Image: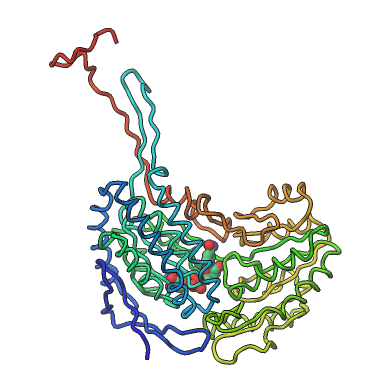
Amino acid sequence: MTTRITHWTDGSATPGDSGRSGPVFNPATGEQTGEVDLAGRDELDRAVRSATEAAAFWRSTSLARRTGVLFRFRELLAASIDDLAAIITSEHGKVLSDAKGEIQRGLENVEYACGVAEHMKGGYSEQAGTGVDVYSIRQPLGVVAGITPFNFPVMVPLWMCANAIATGNAFILKPSEKDPSASLFLADLWKKAGLPDGVFSVVQGDKEAVDAILEHPDIAAVSFVGSTPIARYIYETGTRNGKRVQALGGAKNHMLVLPDADVDMAADAAVSAAYGAAGERCMAISVAVAVGDVADPLVDAIAARMPKLRIGDGTDPDSEMGPLITREHRDKVADYIRQGVEAGATAVVDGREADVPSDGFFLGTTLLDRVSPEMTVYTDEIFGPVLCVVRQDSYDEAIALINSNPFANGTAIFTRDGGAARQFQFDVEVGMVGVNVPIPVPVSYYSFGGWKASLFGDAHMYGPEGIAFYTRGKVVTSRWPDPATSTIDLGFPTHR
Ligand code: NAD
C-alpha cells in the first residue's frame, strides 16, 4: 500500500488536482511507499493567494507574538525528533542517528530565529541635522519560497523558513519530490505552534512547480539549495523575473592533509566525512589532497577503517551508512567508479564489490588513489560514497589545485602547524573552511554558503545573512515642528 503525499495550503493538507504525481521509495528496501502529488500552476497559485493574505496579517503581528510561536515550534520540534527522524530515514535512507543530527542542526536555526527581535533592530541617529533624526528599519518581503534538495529534507527547509517566518514573511516550501513527507510533518508542527494558516505552505512538485514559482509575480524571493546546474537556472530565471534569489549549488570538497598531520585523526575525519550519509552531503569530503610522504600512511589508514563501517538499513541501530537515494543514482555512482578505474585510478577499495544488502539502493564505500584532475571522478560531483586521493608534492601545488576547482563550498586542512593553517585560511578560495574539522558547517549565528559554482547570488543562507535576505531596509528621515512653535503652549523654551 502506498501513502498519498499531498500539499499543505491554508493550514491543512490539500490533495492536488493537477492529475500528476510521482513515486516515493524506501531506499533501504527498494519498495515504493508513497505517491506524491506534483503541483501545476493552479495549485501553486492557490497557495500564493493564501500566503499573500497571511503575510499581510503576519507582518503586523507583534514581534512578541511571533517570537512566542517560534519558541513553541522549537519545543514541539525538539519533542518530535524521534518521529521526524523515522520519516527522514524511511524516504532518504540515512541512518537514524544521522537523521536526528540533521534535525538538531535545523533546530539551531529555529533557536537563532527565536532571537528575531534582536536581529531586526535598526539604527537611530538623533540630530543628524538640526531637529532631524534618521533611523533604519527592516521589513519583510511578503511571500517567499524555498526549493530544497533531497539530502536534508528537514535541515535545509529549516535553514530557510525559520528566519523567513520570524522576520514576518509567509513561506512556501517546495521540497524534493524524492522525500517529501517530512515537509508535511513540519507544516503540522507550525500549525500546532500557533502559526496562522497560510504563513507556512507546502507545494509538492517537480520542475513544473519550480517554474511556476520562478514566474509567479507575487513571490518576492526564492531560496534554493540543490545541484549547480539547477542553482544556476534558478538564479538566472528568478532574477530575470525580478526576484531576490539565493541559490546554493553543488560541491567537490577537498581535504588537504599536510605531512605533519595527525594521520589517525585525518583518517577518522576522512572516513566519517566521505562516507557518512553515503556521501550524499553537500559538505561531504570527496577529495583528499595528500601532500608529500603523508600519502601512503593516509591511504593505508583510511583503507584500514573502511571494512569496519557497517552498511545497512538506516533503521537498524547498528548501521552506520545507509543506501543511496534511488536505484538510478546508485548506478550512476557505480559507473563513476568504473570510469575512474578505466582512467587509471587505483581502486584501493571498490564499493561495487562490497557485500551489501541486495534489496534497496546500496553501494559499498570506495577509495580511489592516484586520481588526477582530468578524470571525471575528480571533475564531477559524484554525490556518493567515493573518496578520491590526489597526491601533490607541495602545499603550493595543493592550494593551486583546490583554487582551480570550479566548486568552492567547503574545505579543510589537517596539520599540526598553526601557521600553515592560518596561511591556508588566507589563501583558499572556498566559502567554508575547517582546521582539523572535516565538515565545517557554520553554527546558526554565522551564515552558510560556498563561493564560485557553489553559490549564485550574494547572500549566504541562514544567520545574519538570512535575516538580511528575507527583509529589506528602509531609512526614515524625520523632522517634527519645533514644539516651541506649537499653537498650543506646551511650556517649551524658545531658545533651542
Ligand atoms: P537537484 O538540483 O536535483 O534538486 C533540487 C531541487 O530542484 C528539488 O526540489 C528538485 O525538485 C528541483 N529540480 C530538480 N530538477 C529541476 C529542474 N530541471 N528544473 C527545476 N527544478 C528542478 O538536487 P538534489 O539531487 O535534490 O540534491 C543534491 C544536490 O544538492 C547536490 O548537488 C548537493 O551538493 C546539493 N546541495 C547543496 C547544498 C549547499 O549548501 N550548497 C546543500 C545540500 C545539497
Residue at the location (56% across, 86% down)?
361
Quadrant location of the C terminus? top left
Q: Is residue 228 visible?
A: no
In the rendering, at what x and y percent does residue 255 appear?
70, 62
Q: Is residue 348 left or right of residue 80?
A: right
Total number of numbered labels?
0
- Residue 136, percent across and down? 37, 36
Above or below 493: residue 262:
below
Which of 432/264 is in front? 264
Give left or right: position of 126 versus 391. left
Q: Is residue 243 left or right of residue 30?
A: left
Seen as rendered, the residue at the extreme left is 488
> Residue 409: where, in percent of width, then height?
59, 60
Report whether 187 appears left or right of 311. Answer: left
Quarter-of-image position of residue 77: bottom left
Question: What residue appears at the point 68 percent right and 63 percent down from the top-left corner?
Answer: 254
Residue at x 37%, y 66% (from the top left corner): 173
Dividing the picture into quarters, in which one does residue 213 lie? bottom left
- Which of these two is toward me, 327 or 274? 274
Q: Residue furthest right?
A: 293
Residue 456 drawn at (x, y percent): 51, 57
Residue shown at 55% from the left, 71% from the top = 98
Residue 68, placed above or below residue 274: above
Quadrant in which the N terminus appears: bottom left
Asked whether residue 137 appears in the rendered view, the answer is yes
- By what rule are the colours in the image chosen? rainbow
Between residue 16 and residue 73, name the one nearer to us. Answer: 73
Residue 426 against residue 20 in the figure, above or below = above
